[in-house]
Amino acid sequence: MLNEKVSKLLNEQINHELYSAYLYLDISNYYKHNGLDGFANWYKIQAQEERDHAMLFMEYLQNNGDIVTLEAIAKPDKVYEGFKMPIEVAFEHEVFVTNLVHNIYGQAAKVKDYRTIQFLDWFVKEQGEEEATADGLVKKMELFGADSRGLYLIDTELAARVYSPPSLVL
């Protein structure tokens, strides 16, 4: 049985991951509407990854005999002004999610829940990659996004992304 506080935080993380998927679908829709299909593709795949993360948290709780409590998922409320803003919002959101994962990790360490710590190790690494990628996109937009040719090249690069499910084994 998992510690009650750790279990609660893991359950809440499911909702945060599903919100992340909603946020990235919202960003994808914004870019699709504005004719940037590569950006739309990139964020649509990002939404799939976040959904998979939620499923991993859910499966972990189930495998440990805990009850999964699904809550309502908030509607993204951002109004994007320009092509750079959604990327900045995504980066800020990844930093937020990293802090959430670290909080769960800290609580698990506090109660010596080594199994949960081991499970979360993958997410700690993943969040480091997510932040670095999101930050890289912000920097590319700052360098090249204001120029239509640069924007086209970034869009073409992002269009090449394909979905690859997470390789975490529970």
Image: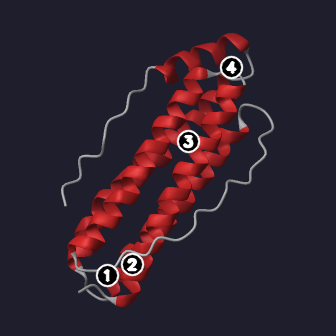
Q: Quadrant of the C terminus?
A: bottom left
Indicate the amino acid at tag 4: Gly
Which residue is disc 3 drawn over?
135
> What crowding class fits label 3: few (fewer than 14 Cα within 10 Å), some (14-19), or many (20 or more)?
some
Work out which residue is located at the far top of the displayed protein and give it: 149
Which residue is disc 1 drawn over?
109
Spatial separation of the CA atoms under disc 2 and disc 4: 43 Å
Spatial separation of the CA atoms under disc 1 and disc 3: 29 Å
Check if mark 1's residue and mark 3's residue have beta carbons within 8 Å: no
Sooner in the amino-acid sequence: mark 4 or mark 3: 4
Q: Is residue 138 above or below residue 152?
A: below
Indicate the amino acid at tag 2: Gly
Residue at image x 64%, y 43%? 26
> What crowding class fits label 4: few (fewer than 14 Cα within 10 Å), some (14-19), or many (20 or more)?
few
Which residue is disc 2 drawn over?
106
Check if mark 2's residue and mark 1's residue have beta carbons within 8 Å: yes
- From the image, state whether disc 4 or disc 3 is nearer to you: 4
- From the image, state whether disc 1 or disc 4 is nearer to you: 4
Which residue is disc 4 drawn over?
35
